[in-house]
Amino acid sequence: MLLHLAVWPEVEEYLKTSSAIIVPIGSTEQHGPNGLIGTDAICPTAIAHEMARRITVLIGPTLSVGMAQHHLGFPGTIALRPSTLLALVGDVIESLLRHGFTHVYFLNGHGGNVATINTAFSEVWSSASFAGRDGAAPRLKLRNWWMGPAVRALSEELFGDAEGSHATPAEVSLSWYAHPEAVKTVSMSPEQADTGPIRDAADYRRSFPDGRIGSNPGLASVEYGQRILAAAVDDTLADFTAFTEST
Ligand code: NI
């Protein structure tokens, strides 16, 4: 069930048998010459929505902007400061806890969000600790969709080290599978981008002039995207099931 297409009595009913929710979270940022700006939100959304077709689970609204300050040198990027994202994630969690959700699972599509999401979890748990609350701790989990074993094995098989770390052929393929109407055909020069550290926006654009890091998304295809989605759904179903069964 998708939260944004549900009515409140359905959510109340759902809570009688389950208190877990998946919240896709991503970013709105440049993804190189052929990767869609919505890639990091599109990928976890596609995975979560496919999961909802396979099991009974509630999927929250995709949080589609993230901590992407380093991409602001490229037009179209919309970024939240870490402090803004921290407040956003914290308020989403607190809203859900108020309704009786006990397990909140963030399915993440953007590496830049990781530190802040984990900090938001610490803030929620800190509030309980300082208040001396005695009840069960909220179960909160961050899962990066591209880190599952099936996805990693498939990316390695299809792309090897051309997967890189930003604007990767795996994520571009998956986003194209979800939105074939938006596929772009662009030649890459150089074929595989350089790697290096991420700092601020101007530095990023100087170091990575077309936006990619270490990747060759020229290898992306809709067909690969279908396989990557299937692998990601398998990975995430296993991980989510283990999470909801944890006490
Ligand atoms: Ni990405």
Image (cartoon, rainbow, N blue to C red):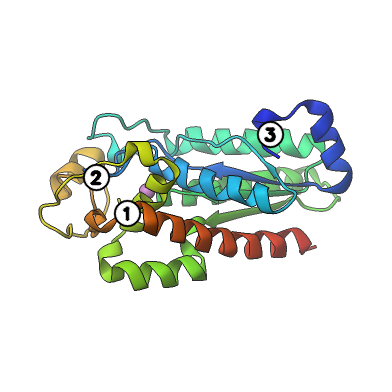
Query: Residue 58: which quarter of the image?
Result: top right
Q: Quadrant of the C terminus?
A: bottom right
Q: Dot 3: few (<14), some (14–19), or many (≥20) neighbours within 10 Å?
A: some
Query: Residue 181: which quarter of the image?
Result: top left
Q: Which label belongs to residue 3?
A: 3
- The residue that mark 2 highlights is 32
Amino acid carrying mark 1 in the image: Ser
Q: Which label belongs to residue 221?
A: 1
Estimate the x, y position of residue 162 in percent, counting from the top left.
25, 65
User: Please, what secondary structure does the residue beneath circle 2 have?
Assistant: loop
Q: Which label belongs to residue 233?
A: none
Foreground label between 2 and 1:
1
Estimate the x, y position of residue 204 in percent, counting from the top left.
21, 45
Estimate the x, y position of residue 209 in percent, counting from the top left.
14, 45
Instruction: Tell me what residue is drawn at x 46 percent, y 49 percent.
Output: 109
Task: Name the residue nearer the viewer: 97 or 168.
Answer: 168
Task: Name the residue nearer the viewer: 43 or 115.
Answer: 43
Estimate the x, y position of residue 125 in percent, counting from the top left.
69, 49
Q: From the viewer's perspective, tell me whether residue 230 is left or right of residue 153.
A: right
The tag earlier along the polypeptide, 3 or 2, is 3
Instruction: Tell me what residue is drawn at x 79 percent, y 27 percent.
Output: 8
Q: Is residue 132 above or below residue 226?
A: above
Q: Dot 2: few (<14), some (14–19), or many (≥20) neighbours within 10 Å?
A: many
Q: From the viewer's perspective, tell me whether residue 67 is left or right of residue 107.
A: left
Amino acid carrying mark 3 in the image: Leu
